[in-house]
Image (cartoon, helix red, strand yellow):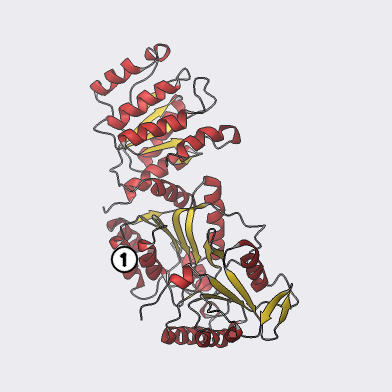
Amino acid sequence: MKMNFTPLFKPKTMAVAGVSLSNDRHPANVIFHKLLLRYPVDVFAVNPRGGRLQREKVYKQLTEIEQKIDHVVIAVRAEHVPKVIQDCIHAGAGSATIISGGFAETGHEDLQARIVNLAADAGLPFIGPNCLGIYAPGRFDTFFLPGERLVRPMAGNVAIVSQSGGVLVDQLVKFAGQGIGVSLAVSIGNKAMIRETELLNYLSKDTRTQVIAFYIEGFGPNEGREFVLAAARSSKPVIVLKAGKSASGSRAVASHTASLAGDYAVFSQVMAQYGIAEAKTEYELISFCEALSCYRRAISGRVGIVTVSGGHGALAVDTCQQHGLSVSALDPEVKSALQARLSPSVQSIASLQNPIDLTGSALDDDFIAAVDALSSAQNIDCVLVLLLPYSPGISSDLGARLGHVYRQRRTPLVAYVPHVEKYRMLIEGFELNQIPVSDAIEGAVLMVEALRRCQPC
C-alpha cells in the first residue's frame, strides 16, 4: 500500500503518547515540552489517567482530541504500543514515530510484527521502533534529548538517515561545527516499517533536500539490492556510511537493531559500480556531505593546488595520490600566462608547478590569478586552495573574491582554512558562495574525492 509521508515529515498537529504526570524527565515529557515551546505545531499530551501537565490538558486517549492529529510520538512501554497504534488508527492519525524499545532488537520479533501488521493494514506510516525519530529544523523535533543539550545544525540541503540515534546526534553536532545545513534528520532504529529505500524515494523528490546521506547497519533479504537500484535512479548524490564491516561489527549490529550486516565487500563494490559515494569513516561522511551540498557535478579527479606553503602543498599532493586523485603538471602556456599576472614581488620566487606555491609574499590578487588560471586549464577539473590566514598579504575578503572566480569559471573550488574565530570572516566569504571549507588538508582532499566518487565506476 502506498503511504502518504506528508503528515510524517510536515505535520501541523502532533500528539505525544506516554507523558508522565510525575516524572518531567520522562522521554515523552522532554519531547512534549520541546514541541510545545520551540516549534510551530499544535501539540497534545496523552496519558490514560488524564489531568494537567504544567497547566496543559492531558488527554486520556487520542480519540478525545478535537483536532485531527498528523503525527503521534509514541513513548510507552513496548507491550502497550499495539494499543496506542490502534488508538492512532481509530483517531484517524496520519503517522507515528515509535520511540519505545523492546522489540526485535531484544528478541521480541512477534511484538514488532504485530505493530507492523496493524499499521500496514490501516495505511499508517511509522518510524521506528527503538529510535529517536525525526529532526526537521524549524519545524519539529521528536528526539527525547533536552533542547538545551542539543547542538543543532542550521537549516540546509543535506538529509541524513541513520539506524543509530547516537550516531545521528553525533553527526549533527559535527555538521553544526562544520557549517553543514540539514533539511531532515531521521533515526529509524529497527526500521520495522519505513526503511532506507522508502526514505530515499521520498527524499529524492523533496525540494528542500539536495544531498542524501545514510548510516546503515544492515539490510533484510533483497533489501540491499532495492536500495542500490533506488540510489542509482536518484538525481541527487547519495552517501553511505556502512557499519558491520568486520565479523565483530556484524555481531554488534545484530544486537543493536536486529539487522543483517551482509557481505560488506560485495555491497561496497556494488555501491561504487552504481555511483553511490561510500564514506569509509565518520570524517569522510562529514567531508562528503559538505562538498556535495555545494557541487552536484561529478569530476574525474584532476586537481590543481594553490598554496603559500611548500610543505602544505607537498602534504596535499601525497594525500591526493593516496585517494587516487591526480595532480598533473601544468601546460607551459598556462604557467606563462599566470606568471605575467602575478605581482612583482612574487613573480621571481613563486613556483608555478602543480602545486602552485605563491610563497608567503603572495597578495590576494596573486591567489585570484592562480585560481583563475587553474580553473581555466584543460587538465584540471577541481581546484584546491590552501590558505594560511596569517600570511601578511592575505585579506579577510579573499574567500569572497575567490568565490567570484568560481561563479565565473564554474570549476569546483575547495578550500583549506584553519577554523579559528579570528578567521571567521575569511571562511564566511567561501561559505556564502557555496564553496566547501575544511580545517584540515585531509578533509579538503576528501571533499574533492567526494566529487569523484559520486559517479559510476
In the image, residue 366 above or below residue 83: above
In the image, residue 427 above or below residue 180: above
Q: Is residue 24 visible?
A: yes
Along the line of sight, the residue nearer the viewer: 148 or 438: 148
Secondary structure, mark 1, is: helix
Residue farthest toward the right in the current orientation of the protein = 22
Q: How crowded is mark 1: few (under 14 residues within 10 Å), some or many (20 or more)?
A: some
Residue farthest toward the front in the current orientation of the protein = 66
Q: Residue at x 65, y 71 (%)?
A: 27
Question: In the rendered view, does 58 fall on the left or right side of 128?
Answer: right
Query: Dot 1 corresponds to which residue?
Result: 230
Total residue callouts:
1
Q: Position of residue 228 (x, y in %)?
A: 32, 64
Question: In the rendered view, does 302 fall on the left or right side of 70?
Answer: left
Q: Position of residue 343 (x, y in %)?
A: 39, 15
Question: In the rendered view, does 338 fall on the left or right side of 186?
Answer: left
Question: In the rendered view, does 317 fall on the left or right side of 257?
Answer: left
Quarter containing the N terminus: bottom left
Q: Residue at x 60, y 72 (%)?
A: 43
| Type of amino acid under label 1 | Ala
Q: Where is residue 48 in the image (x, y as percent from the top left)?
A: 67, 86
Q: Residue at x 66, y 57 (%)?
A: 149
* Location of residue 308 (image quadrant): top left
Q: Residue at x 56, y 88 (%)?
A: 83
In the image, residue 139 above or below residue 284: below
Q: Where is residue 425 in the image (x, y as percent from the top left)?
A: 54, 33
Q: Can residue 262 be seen in this view?
A: no
